[in-house]
Amino acid sequence: MRRWKSSELEARIQEKMPAVNSAMLASGRLRKYRRRPRDKEEQKVLDHLCKNNWESALARGKVKKLSRRKWYYEFD
């Protein structure tokens, strides 16, 4: 088994760090970010879907108000 001096280890870490950091950042972005704003019709549809999901969760008892500022939402 190879033995490492702490100075060698630090130098190797510093040498590899930029490549590792860029690889980690690149692999973390699985989804592209949206660059253009949503059009009004799309926003209305999304608002309607979210409102329906919220109302159905309320009707099924999935949402509970714990205190004035805390809520509990049970995901399926």
Image: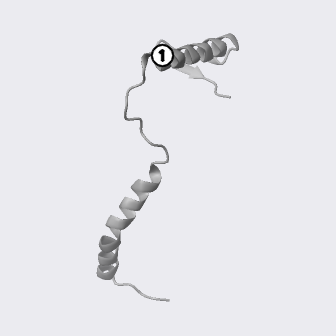
Q: On the picture, is 54 further left or further right than 34?
A: right
* Looking at the image, residue 71 lies above or below residue 2: above
* Looking at the image, residue 30 lies above or below residue 1: above
* Looking at the image, residue 27 lies above or below residue 69: below
Say how many tags the image has. Answer: 1
Q: What residue is at 35 percent from the left and 78 percent from the top?
A: 9
Q: Which residue position is annotated with label 1?
A: 41
Q: Nearer the viewer, residue 14 or 34?
A: 34
Q: Nearer the viewer, residue 49 or 69?
A: 49
Element under disc 1: helix
Task: Find residue 1 and report its horizontal and vertical position in percent.
Answer: 50, 89
Q: Nearer the viewer, residue 37 or 54?
A: 37
Q: Amino acid at mark 1?
A: Glu
Q: Nearer the viewer, residue 19 or 34?
A: 34
Q: What residue is at 42 percent from the left and 58 percent from the top?
A: 24
Task: Find residue 39 and report its horizontal and vertical position in percent.
Answer: 42, 21
Task: Find residue 71 and report its horizontal and vertical position in percent.
Answer: 54, 19
Q: What residue is at 68 percent from the left and 10 percent from the top?
A: 59
Mark 1 crowd level (few <14, some 14–19, many ≥20, 10 Å Cα): few
Task: Find residue 50 and report its horizontal and vertical position in percent.
Answer: 56, 18
Most extreme residue toward the right is 60
In which quadrant of the rendered image does the C terminus lie?
top right
Q: What residue is at 42 percent from the left and 55 percent from the top?
A: 26
Q: Quadrant of residue 74?
A: top right
- Which colour assignment does the render follow? one colour
Q: Quadrant of residue 57?
A: top right
